[in-house]
Amino acid sequence: MVSKIITCIKFGKERSVSFISHLDVLRVFERALRRAGLPLAYTKGYSPRPKLVFGQALSLGLTSRGEYLDISLENEVDENEVQELLVATLPPGFPVYMAKNLDDKVKPVMAAITHASYLFKGDRALEILEALDKSEIIFIKEKNNKKTETDLRPLINSIEPYEDGVRLICRAGSAYNLRPDALLTALSLDDEQIKVCREDLFIERNGSLVSPLMRLM
Amino acid sequence: MLTYQDLLEKHLNRIEKPARYLGTELHSIQRKKQPKVHVALAFPDVYEVGMSHLGIKILYHIANKDPNYWAERVFAPWPDMEAILNEEKIPLMTLESSTPLGKLDLVGFTLQYELSYSNILRMLRLASIPIRSKDRKSGPLVIAGGPCAFNPEPLAPFFDVFVLGDGEEVFLRILEILEQEPDREKRLQAIAKLSGVYVPSDYEIEYKQDSTIAKITPEKKVKKAIIKDLDAVDYPTSPIVPYLQTIHDRVNVEVFRGCLRGCRFCQAGMLYRPTRERSKEEIKRLVLETLKNTGYEEVSLTSLSTADYSALACLVPELMQVLEPEKISLSLPSLRIDSFSVELAREIEKVKKTGLTFAPEAGSQRMRNVINKNVTEEDLLKTAEAAFQNGWTHIKLYFMIGLPTETDEDILAIAELGKKVRELGRRYTKRVTVTVSTSSFVPKGHTPFQWCGQNPRDELRRKQFLLKDNLKGPGLNYSWHNPEISYLEAVIARGDRRVAEAILYAEEHGAHFDTWNEYFKPELWAEAFKACGIDPDFYALRERPQNEVFPWEHIDSGVEKSFLYHEWQKALAEQTTQDCREVGCTGCGVCSSFATAISLKGGE
């Protein structure tokens, strides 16, 4: 009896592919994995699809150095081989940094994510630092003629200068999530040409942030 | 100079689908060095439509195999991107390298449907390329090919050259000429000598008092180009894999070209004669290689009538043996109305069960004899029953309305047939749905129906209401086409050179994306015809006498006019003509004209 396995890969999204939507990225990987000839595990039913779980959707226009994808495989393949196969077959703009085999009983990456770090660059990016001095940062979202107000301040862990911009560490995931574009809007910085890059995603464990590749059962 | 990437960065929130303009998809061709010959393959519709087109994939592949050539793509920019190009004063550019079209050696458009013509003019305008051929003294050659090139006249003033028929070999010859000859005028002269090439400015048209054509000079006809052996031409096994979901987002392997069923309304069936099959082994090789290179989850075997492929009964199970374990589905886009087709459908739908579609085309036997669609009601009912028995619950039926000699009885027979299929289905399932879909018949050149008039729009609407009233009830759906669109299609499809002015007027006044309901403006086209002194009814509705000189009289598909007229007379007499594969030569003339023959390689 071969046991199934989850191979989690960490990949990036460079500028040239930052305009590809989340759903389209999903198809990019489905096809790349098939081209790579990996022993994919499929869903049951009329339209079988490979079992893939992404860490968190990335907004259109953002680049990233820290995306995660759980691939369900029928049997174990060497981690380095998975990485090499994907590097060889993915279209340009999707670097693969690492692949790690995990037991298939680990929490799916999407459910496990709790935090993210973002890098902001651009002329006025340093103004984001002022957010730390505020006691609340109200973001107003309009949907179907209904306004909802959210205070973004509690979702922020830290903001610090980084290279010529800033680095933000904040809540992410399905329960509490800070969207970087919402923060820029709330700070009235959304008309500026500030470039945003997702640096990484994390799981909080005993008060510290660890990589989704380090998930335990 | 800004690139598409720059424009996306700058205007991201204004662009609906930025992935249309990336040009970096898997297997797209990038060149570091300036190539000797730089051309664009242009499809005059939006990315998702253009990227589904097989012809562009083939030409892209054969041109780019040579490192000296670079063929890039360009599609009609969606209105959001068009506005940005105008605002930024940036000319229309190719996708791969953001090169303005005006800097290329050649721009080649594919003509798939008449209602894309306004987009062609818009693309030239956006590229700042003079719209009329006579005004272009420098810059790229502007050429066209595809089925609509068989009546090139409504576009005659806008193109330097048209390519007729199978484009693979001609296109390579053209690229060679561009490589060897730098002078624009000499390039044109050399290209004009190739077979399958029509230079509209070499021809003059004289008209009679009654507006019909008196004479086309010179009398020399231009013959289409033909590929006699499909296995001998190169076929792409590493097609571009788009990021966006396109209309046909899958591996497409062409199993044969041409169709000999002889449906009298079908232009493709006349233009692409004779049938030329790929061998079964070659098809299998192409399917497997393309899957390996693309990672697609679906394969489609394409042609005008795939169930007619001579070795399909062996090919499908052989393919399924490989595809099924890989969870890859197979689709056959055109099923025949017989139990063999249901058998095939059952074979391929092991992976994914979808609806089944059949095209009886007409409701009554009389009408089916007129159009030479050789299926009986019994065939259809038996086929439908087999489908229900095998677990299908949804059946779609395609028909045409407005066919020559049609009466209300023929229309009502469509509704009756839909209901009979529903009743049949109820014996097997409670959830049966039958969708009846009608399009409005558009008479096309080079077919036996080129002499007949289209039904007026009000008549088409009346017939649609007749069907709506008679296709009510649970388990029955009816869908129809906008008669205004079919009317415009009919005007342009049999239009002459004078119609070109109306197309230009309409485009100048805002017409584009005419196949898209949200952009189609029938009033604007009516205004255009009026402004140009053109009576659109003259082209769409008029029945032509036997000896009429058609605008496409000098374009030779190989099928003789006398054969077409004989077929037209047989249609009026409700007589059918069988497939020449079964009953021997029916005298269309194409094989002798090209010294070729039907090639049924699949059965070898």
Image (cartoon, coloured by chain):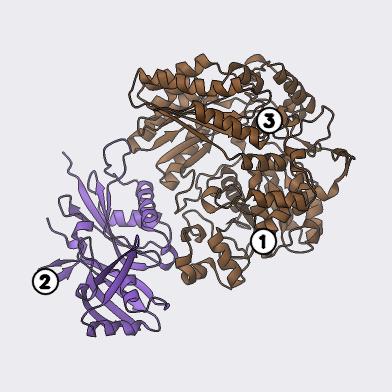
Amino acid type assigned to the residue bearing label 2 in the image: Gly
Chain A rendered in what hue? purple
Q: Which mark is residue A207?
A: 2
Amino acid type assigned to the residue bearing label 3 in the image: Met
Indicate the position of residue A121 as horizontal and vertical percent values. Answer: 37, 79
Q: Residues within 10 Å of mark 2 (few under 14, many from 20)?
A: few
Amino acid type assigned to the residue bearing label 1 in the image: Lys
Determine the CA span between mark 2 and mark 3: 74 Å
Tell which subunit mark 3 falls on: B
Indicate the position of residue B63 as horizontal and vertical percent values. Answer: 62, 51
Determine the CA span between mark 1 and mark 2: 62 Å
Tell which subunit mark 1 falls on: B
Give me the residue at 58% from left, 24% from top: B411
Image quadrant holding the C terminus of chain B, namely top right
Chain B rendered in what hue? brown
Indicate the position of residue B362 as horizontal and vertical percent values. Answer: 58, 24
Q: Residues within 10 Å of mark 3 (few under 14, many from 20)?
A: many
For mark 1, what is the residue? B36
Circles 2, 3 touching at the beta carbon (< 8 Å): no
Task: Indicate left or right for B556 with A132 as reference.
Answer: right
